[in-house]
Image (cartoon, rainbow, N blue to C red):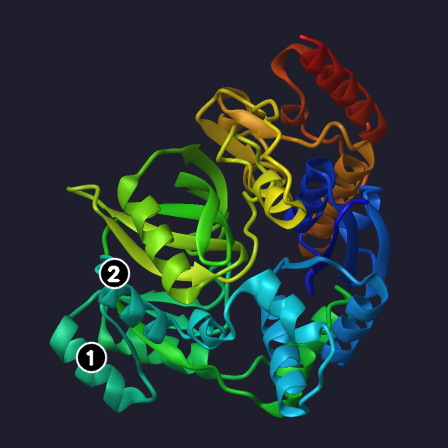
């Protein structure tokens, strides 16, 4: 019997859909708890989906776990991980003897690690204790703390809010005025109008609760490291790294946003950092680590942890670099079955992120464009989602505009393609590539 993995997510991210496909390919039975109309429902790999409700998050997760009876839970975003931590704490306080706490420990790691992965300053202090190079980071509660920090460290500085990801809670300040403005913005609860708009228009109510409760964020000041960004995605099991992917970030959606183009690298410092942290925190499951590679020396500086799967976690790049396969082996007890690498190219354009960033990006042709042609419904959903986004933010944009031909390999470019033609030609290309 196949082991069951429950994908738990609070956001409609396309990477979670890609991860669902990869986990199913690795051998898992996949079920999911997610918001309505999530892209993973287009993949056909989730046997059952359970509704995530932002105003009743713990009940949503607990009910899904009870129904699915999974062998493993994989969170797809930071808030999902936080909900699982809250569930664990609730079960412990009520002294319940069910399977929930052991399952969460098996999926995420030792409960002692739960607070640390959401506290940037505490996490990087731990990293320094492990002799992992990382920038000085401290909590700044008010303007007085900020001025004291600036006087001792200088500018520029990075200000980061706990509990945020994807660059949403990061601002770089080059002087005291910018720093104080950033502190106020990052610490403030989500604006009610923004929370209501996201709830009604995007059908995403994750901001509504913190907005109504006027919950303020903890903000950290971090010494600025000039250089190139890099990221690691790791699979771990009971304190041991069992699979890893290391990339240099080539392009991003925006200055402090998520990566859209990455380049495969081997970096010993990044590998050692992952091994030491996983061992000390006794982690399990999928996690991500972000680094800065120092401009002049290339030395790796650890800057934060993502306590969940990241957008590159579905990529299969050979033995030891296939995270879903490594997790399946750990859960099932069966040896890892080598699968074909998706590409021999070092540069990977992530779909749909790079296409959304720049429809004419040269990386869509020169690198490996990671389009899931084997799942035409997901490709179609990406194209239609992009059209809706254009319509919302740019009312003059035509809903009937032709999808960019850069989605297709160079030899399949056609002057006019609707979504169905695009998917059909792309799927045909995928089949021919597999045969070769």
Q: Quadrant of the C terminus?
A: top right
Q: Quadrant of residue 72?
A: bottom right
- Where residue 221 sits in the image (x, y, percent)? 30, 74
Examine the rendered structure and indicate whether residue 425 appears above or below residue 159.
Answer: above
Q: Quadrant of residue 386?
A: top right
The residue that label 1 is drawn on is 149
Q: Is residue 85 visible?
A: yes
Give the CA distance from mark 2 to mark 1.
Answer: 17 Å
| Mark 2 surroundings within 10 Å by alpha-carbon count, few (fewer than 14), some (14 through 19), many (20 or more) | many
Q: Residue at image x 72%, y 19%? A: 430
Examine the rendered structure and indicate whether residue 303 appears above or below residue 315.
Answer: below
- Please name whichever residue, 349 or 63, is drawn nearer the observer in this view of the structure: 63
Q: Residue at image x 42%, y 56%? A: 256
The residue that label 2 is drawn on is 134
Disc 2 or 1, which lies upstream in sequence?
Answer: 2
Q: Which mark is residue 254?
A: none
Marks 2, 1: nearer the viewer: 2
Question: How many marks do you count on the picture?
Answer: 2
Q: Is residue 386 left or right of residue 43?
A: left
Q: Residue at image x 37%, y 64%? A: 280
Label 1: which secondary element: helix
- Please name whichever residue, 195 or 338, is drawn nearer the observer in this view of the structure: 338
């Amino acid at each position: 019997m196949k082991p069951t993995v429950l994908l738990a997510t609070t956001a409609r991210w396309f990477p979670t859909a890609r991860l669902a496909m990869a986990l199913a390919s690795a051998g898992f039975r996949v079920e999911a708890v997610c918001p309505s109309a999530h892209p993973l429902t287009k993949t056909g790999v989730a046997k059952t989906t359970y509704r995530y409700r932002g105003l009743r998050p713990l009940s949503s997760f607990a009910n899904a776990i009870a129904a699915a009876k999974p062998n493993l839970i994989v969170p797809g975003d930071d808030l999902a991980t936080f909900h699982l931590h809250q569930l664990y704490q609730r079960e412990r306080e009520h002294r319940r003897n069910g399977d929930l706490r052991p399952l969460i420990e098996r999926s995420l790691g030792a409960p002692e690690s739960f607070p640390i992965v959401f506290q940037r300053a505490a996490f990087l202090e731990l990293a320094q204790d492990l002799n992992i190079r990382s920038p000085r980071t401290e909590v700044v509660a008010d303007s007085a703390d900020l001025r004291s920090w600036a006087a001792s460290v200088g500018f520029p500085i990075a200000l980061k809010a706990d509990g945020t990801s994807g660059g949403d809670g990061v601002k770089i300040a080059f002087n005291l005025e910018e720093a104080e403005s950033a502190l106020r913005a990052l610490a403030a609860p989500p604006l009610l109008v923004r929370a209501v708009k996201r709830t009604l228009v995007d059908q995403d109510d994750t901001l509504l609760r913190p907005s109504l409760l006027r919950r303020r964020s903890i903000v950290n000041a971090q010494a600025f490291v000039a250089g190139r960004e890099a990221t690691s995605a790791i699979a771990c099991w009971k304190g041991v790294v069992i699979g890893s992917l290391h990339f240099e970030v080539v392009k991003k959606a925006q200055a402090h946003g998520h990566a859209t183009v990455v380049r495969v690298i081997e970096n010993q410092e990044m590998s050692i950092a992952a091994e030491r942290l996983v061992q000390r925190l006794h982690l399990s499951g999928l996690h991500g680590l972000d680094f800065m590679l120092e401009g002049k020396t290339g030395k790796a500086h650890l800057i934060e942890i993502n306590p969940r799967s990241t957008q590159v976690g579905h990529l299969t790049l050979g033995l030891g670099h296939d995270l879903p396969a490594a997790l399946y082996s750990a859960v099932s007890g069966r040896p890892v079955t080598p699968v074909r690498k998706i590409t021999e190219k070092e540069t990977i354009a992530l779909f749909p992120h790079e296409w959304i960033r720049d429809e004419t990006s040269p990386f869509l042709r020169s690198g490996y464009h990671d389009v899931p042609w084997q799942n035409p419904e997901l490709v179609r959903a990406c194209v239609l989602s992009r059209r809706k986004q254009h319509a919302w933010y740019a009312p003059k944009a035509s809903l009937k505009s032709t999808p960019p031909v850069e989605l297709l390999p160079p030899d399949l470019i056609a002057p006019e393609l609707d979504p169905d033609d695009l998917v059909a030609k792309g799927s045909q290309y995928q089949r021919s590539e597999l045969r070769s």
